[in-house]
Image (cartoon, rainbow, N blue to C red):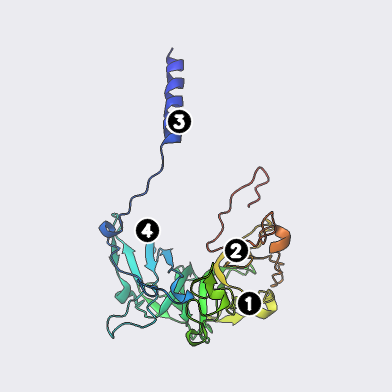
Amino acid sequence: MKRLGKGLLIAGFLGATATTPVQFVDIALEAGLKDTFYCGSDELKKYILETLGNGVALIDYNNDGYPDVFFVTASRLEGFPKGREPSNQLYRNNRNGTFTRVTEEAGLTQFGWGQGACVGDFDNDGFEDLFVTYYGQSHLYRNAGNGSFVDVTESTGLKQGKRWCTGCAFVDYDLDGRVDLFIANCVVFEKEQIPLPGGAPDCKWNGLPVLCGPRGLPGGTNQLFHNEGNGKFRNVSVSSGVTKPGPRYSLSVTPIDFDRDGWPDIYVAVDSQPSLLFRNCHDGTFPEVAVESGVAYSEDGKERPGWAPPRAISTGMDGLTS
């Protein structure tokens, strides 16, 4: 009887947990995450740049074992009064369920049209560094190890002309022990050259005016930078083959070893076009294999666009992902 009782108790417990829904409660304000982040007009968005929300990164910047939070903000096309421009924000984890804003003391106050962020220790000093993508000039911040960051964008060779950079990822693609950097690029956005909603054939839906893009606008070109190990990055976008697919409306980047050969491949989610899958050939080159891998088109031949990184799951005993 005791054994039967235990069995019933376990079955009852498993049944209860299986049907109990997981619930999440918004505690941002109580936790101290109180800043406002912007991405275009709150009332009427006229351009595609205003529609893409901002990123967030979890980073244990002070190596205390607790994840801190970095939020990215954009702006408004009409701008803000001087002194009231919104900035990205870094919040330190207080280890008690709350966070403290430490942006200014960390040297991360930055205005502009921020988009995304990724974390990686590019100089192998044991402290996580931060790369922030922008419409404009993206920024690489080196973690100084004392609670502050230094903008090393120019000295590392990552300063370039205006681009709409979206997602990014640090990935050691050549297994040399140093993380390299992949940057996704979306639309070539020049406000003066883009019609207002309804102003072109691609800016209408069922006869109604909608904002223009991404279809009908020039796409961006993705980029791969090799970590040279001397505090500098080298642009290997062309030689690696990541530019061969041509302009795309790329959004997010996910390193994933999809063929389980021990070398990281790169998946890029693309808006309004088939997404991209770059297979690592172990020699610094990446052929694009989304079509033959089955992630470019659906079963009925429709393109598989994407916004966010894919969720990799095991498909069985073989351990492969899909």
Q: Which one is in front, 47 or 27?
A: 47
Q: Position of residue 157 (x, y in %)?
A: 54, 84
Mark whose residue sits in front, 4 or 3: 3
Residue that badge 3 annotates:
14
The amino acid marked with disc number 1 is Pro
- Tell me which numbered mark, 3 or 1, is placed earlier along the sequence: 3
Q: Residue 173: name its quadrant.
A: bottom right
Q: Dot 4: few (<14), some (14–19), or many (≥20) neighbours within 10 Å?
A: some
Vertical placement of residue 254 versus 24, above or below: below
- Tell me which numbered mark, 1 or 2, is placed earlier along the sequence: 1
The amino acid marked with disc number 3 is Leu
Looking at the image, can residue 179 be seen? Answer: no
Q: Which one is in front, 31 or 44?
A: 44
Q: Is residue 211 left or right of residue 74?
A: right
- Secondary structure under tag 1 reads loop
The amino acid marked with disc number 4 is Tyr
Mark whose residue sits in front, 1 or 4: 1
- Tell me which numbered mark, 1 or 4, is placed earlier along the sequence: 4
Q: CA distance from mark 1 to mark 4?
A: 39 Å
- Tell me which numbered mark, 2 or 4, is placed earlier along the sequence: 4
